[in-house]
Image (spheres, rainbow, N blue to C red):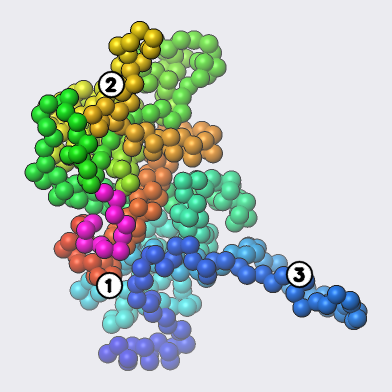
């Protein structure tokens, strides 16, 4: 049946290609195939010139719409196709969920069924829906953002590299952020299942003054913290003081006399030592705001380490420990206690280190509006988690990669991925 369909299509003059079997995503990251090897200028020339240079014939060539010297366009086209095939696979409505793998050279945005010839668009209901730019540009932004992480890829940089307008680069950036936001919950579910299995019957000593270093040895160390990413300066407030809020939340709102609207960004961080990290844009530090985020990402038996801004967690997370960053020294010659950052093996430096990385990277943006902060934070979290866990654990073809569909949420089942415990 399959051979007959291919013969009919060849008789109609259509060149048919089949999507190759899925390869691990590790084969696409930092590959020498993207390095353009240019010959040296002096290669093949002698020290003394004996022949005169021949005049090159000038031939007028039609102007190209896009000039991208040094960019391996076929390589990035394959990345875009693999993204669509692994994360947005199209199935046949007539052949019991048969995955569409046939390509038509005259219609590159269409895939068809190899059995009944059912055709559909490979871009519909994906982040590339109604995408007018060349499809390889999406793969280029994905690849460049991944290999240069934690350095961010700005819209201006995309516009200059790809020689497109700023408006088109903004659209391309938004499409990639949408893709990252759709795939990030998969990493959250993987992390949740792994922590639930690791700390199934785990308990810290009931005495909070007991050292937990030995208890947490060779285990995942989870920290949570909040930080101000962008704040409202005194110049933005026209010299007025902030009366509406207190603490870190005060710096992200304007004065009430200026409307009291939010202009800054407050970021909540959940980080695993040497592992995944999740950033969220929050309006305040109240329990009603941060509580659902923690409950959605961490099981109840998870040991959670924070500062004293999370005192409301007492009685909810029984393995929660906090450290007092404002502890005063008992000696009169010192103001602060020497153990105000880490005490009895309890610290929040894992989250604070990721926040320092986030602030350094987002300094390239200069400013991000609060309504767009979630997209930018999701992109940064997604790229961080890809570098830690890889893309193979969330792709749609785990069966081809040796990962069973029943246990794809288990990190331990993927032996090729780096351990983050």
> Which residue range is magenta in the image?
411-421
Q: Is residue 70 visible?
A: yes
Give the image location of residue 207, x and y in percent: 12, 26
Say if the magenta span includes residue 139.
no
Residue denoted by label 1: 400
55 to 296, vertically: above or below: below
Local crowd size for mark 3, using a 10 Å CA cut-off: few (<14), some (14–19), many (≥20): few
- Viewer-nearest of discs 3 and 2: 2
Give the image location of residue 89, x and y in percent: 32, 66
Spatial CA span between label 2 and label 1: 50 Å
Residue denoted by label 3: 41
- Viewer-nearest of discs 1 and 3: 3
Residue 324's mark? Answer: 2
Q: Earlier in the sequence, mark 2 or mark 1?
A: 2
Residue beneath the point at 49% across and 40% down: 361
Q: Tell me the SS state at disc 2.
A: loop
Q: Is residue 326 visible?
A: no
Q: Quadrant of the N terminus?
A: bottom left
Instruction: Classify residue 325 by image quadrant.
Output: top left
């Amino acid at each position: 049946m399959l051979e007959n369909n291919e013969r009919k299509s060849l008789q109609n003059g259509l060149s048919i290609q089949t999507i190759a079997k899925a390869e691990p995503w590790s084969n696409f990251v930092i590959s020498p195939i993207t390095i353009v090897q240019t010959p040296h200028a002096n290669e093949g020339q002698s020290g003394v010139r004996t022949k005169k240079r021949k005049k090159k014939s000038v031939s007028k060539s039609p102007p190209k719409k896009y000039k991208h010297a040094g960019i391996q366009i076929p390589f990035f086209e394959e990345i875009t196709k693999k993204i669509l095939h692994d994360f947005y696979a199209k199935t046949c409505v007539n052949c019991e969920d048969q995955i569409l793998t046939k390509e038509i050279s005259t219609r590159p945005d269409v895939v068809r069924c190899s059995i009944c010839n059912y055709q559909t668009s490979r871009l519909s209901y994906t982040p590339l829906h109604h995408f007018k730019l060349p499809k390889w540009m999406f793969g280029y932004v994905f690849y460049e953002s991944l290999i240069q992480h934690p350095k961010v890829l700005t819209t201006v940089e995309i516009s200059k590299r790809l020689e497109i307008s700023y408006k088109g680069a903004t659209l391309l950036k938004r499409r990639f952020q949408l893709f990252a936001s759709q795939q990030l919950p998969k990493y959250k579910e993987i992390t949740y299942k792994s922590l639930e299995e690791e700390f199934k019957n785990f308990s810290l000593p009931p005495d909070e003054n007991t050292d937990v270093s030995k208890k947490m040895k060779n285990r995942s160390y989870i920290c949570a913290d909040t930080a101000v990413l962008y704040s409202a300066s005194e110049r933005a407030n026209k010299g007025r003081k902030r009366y509406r809020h207190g603490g870190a939340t005060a710096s992200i709102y304007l004065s009430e006399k200026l409307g009291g609207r939010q202009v800054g960004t407050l970021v909540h961080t959940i980080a695993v030592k040497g592992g995944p990290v999740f950033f969220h844009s929050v309006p305040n530090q109240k329990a009603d705001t941060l509580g659902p985020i923690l409950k959605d990402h961490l099981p109840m038996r998870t040991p959670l380490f924070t500062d004293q801004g999370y005192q409301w967690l007492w009685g909810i997370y029984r393995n929660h420990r906090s450290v007092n960053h404002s502890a005063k020294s008992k000696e009169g010659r010192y103001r602060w206690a020497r153990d105000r950052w880490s005490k009895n093996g309890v610290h929040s430096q894992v989250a604070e280190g990721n926040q320092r990385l986030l602030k350094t990277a987002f300094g390239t943006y200069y400013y991000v509006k609060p309504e767009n902060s979630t997209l930018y934070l999701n992109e940064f979290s997604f790229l961080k988690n890809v570098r830690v866990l890889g893309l193979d654990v969330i792709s749609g073809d785990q069966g081809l990669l040796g990962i069973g569909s029943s246990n794809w949420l288990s990190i331990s089942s993927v032996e090729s991925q780096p351990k983050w415990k």
